[in-house]
Amino acid sequence: MASFDFFAPCPRGLEEALAAELAELGRLAPLSVGKQVPGGVHFAGPWAAGIAANLHSRIASRVLLRVASQGYRSEQDIYDFAVTQRWEEWFSYQQTLRIDVTAIKAPVRSLEFVTLRIKDAVCDRLREKTGARPNIDTAQPDVRVFAFLTATDATLYLDTSGEALFKRGWRLDKGAAPLRENLAAGILRIAGWRADTAANLSLYDPMCGSGTFLAEAAQIALAVPPGANRRFGFEKLKGYDITAWQSLKVAAMDAQRDARARGVPDTIFGSDISGDMLVKARANLERAGVGDVGLKQVDARDMTPPCEGAGIIVTNPPYGERIEVRGRRPSRAAEDEDYDDGGRGQFSRARPDTLDADFYRAFGDTLKQRFTGWSAYLLTTDMSLPGQLRLRESRRTPLFNGALECRLFRFDLIAGAVRKRNGDSATGDAAPESGE
Ligand SMILES: C[S@@+](CC[C@H](N)C(=O)[O-])C[C@H]1O[C@@H](n2cnc3c(N)ncnc32)[C@H](O)[C@@H]1O
């Protein structure tokens, strides 16, 4: 059986989680996990391995099939290298094409020019071998060729995913600032949320927005493949293993049907201050096939544990750059400000810094006072979040949400182990809080 080299890009910071996820896919197809590099993981195996990764990886952004790699010195070298590849064995001139180039320290004039040269090479090759050139379609191509350049080497890949894998096919409405589904899934994995823990661990997103964490968590709990409701780029390529695809697809459909019959475990909860966001979350959850997740409209400062016993909070609070804290709340620091929300629960911000500070202080107090025994995982671009919450993190993981550098802070709300920044004990004995 032929073996191929694949590369799966992912949000930076999730390489280790992706490598572990790919290793688990070894149960479905022979797959050997290779090197982790910033922003992705190499793996190898037959077509079935690439197909299984497309269908089942929650963390990969794409699955790329390595075509060839070679040293180069100039754009002409790259053309000469690309024109010798047997593209006609993968697709025809009747299919539309898109070329993408990324590079690290490449000695080239411009990436646009390299993109053009690779496009010329692929089109020239197809014309020579099949009599016609394919058309370019940058919006919805049938086939995507990726090139990755280092200072010395060029690697050509064929994309097997088509649309990026974080597009699961269930998102109806994006909400104001949705998290990418694969970043959400990676965070859930870091937080220990797995199919086999879901029945005994409660999960709560108190600022759930469009419901990304909730949909991913529920699908994980039910073993619904993330790619169950979408198409893939490899379906348009010649020579992929159609038998492997059919059997993996049938197994995935069976798993999805069984899961839906069992229903979402009653351990997943979400809330948001915005009724509009909850409508969007509900629609997304329905489309993801996990409509029976419990949702409630609550200000996160007033939240209470949604269940008996402890669990995990996983959320991404409003980011300064992307979305505002909402909810009028008189406070000593803010009472002089002009907050007119027109009765809509929306916030017209006179002083965002003050509002955010008040919000995070109150949210931190709520965590300390009401969520003893829980662990909270908060994704934010704000590196000063622990100080604002007056909580000491037990772990901080650098992650990227698109181009935004974030931290995933973990707070263990152990009785007696949280402390207000000013030194007052919040829940009894306290460990000193780390500085920021
Ligand atoms: C960054 S978004 C969360 C995005 C979400 N993870 C998703 O994927 O759609 C932050 C959310 O916090 C909500 N929010 C803002 N202020 C809030 C408050 N005081 N209490 C609860 N939710 C609040 C917003 O309505 C928004 O949905």
Image (cartoon, rainbow, N blue to C red):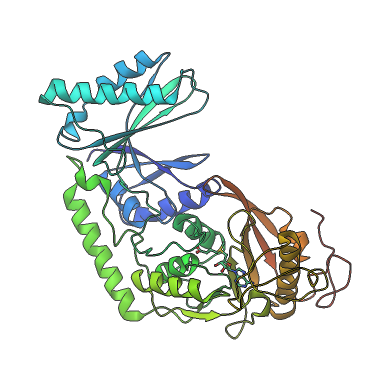
Q: Is residue 331 left or right of residue 1?
A: right
Report the front residue among 331 and 169.
331
Q: Quadrant of residue 314?
A: bottom right
Residue 130 at x, y percent in the picture = 11, 26
Between 275 and 154, the residue placed more toward the observer is: 275
Residue drawn at 25 percent across, 25 percent down = 122
The residue depicted at 31 percent of the width and 47 percent of the height is 161
Q: Quadrant of residue 313?
A: bottom right
Q: Quarter containing ligand 1? A: bottom right
**Quarter occupied by residue 282:** bottom left
What percent of the width, then of the height, locates residue 31? 35, 47
In this view, the residue farthest toward the bottom is: 308
**Residue depicted at x 38% and y 77%:** 291
Along the line of sight, which residue is nearer the eye, 127 or 64? 127
Q: Which is more toward the observer, 115 or 249?
A: 115
| Residue 267 in view of the camera | yes
The number of numbered discs placed on residues in the rendered structure image is 0
Q: Quadrant of the N terminus?
A: top left
Q: Is residue 429 above or below residue 103?
A: below
Residue 194 location in percent, x, y? 47, 66
Percent x, y for residue 248? 25, 58
- Residue 392 appears anywhere in the view: no
The residue under the point 32% across, 24% down is 118
The residue at the far right in this view is 423
- Left/right placement of residue 309 relative to residue 174 reads right
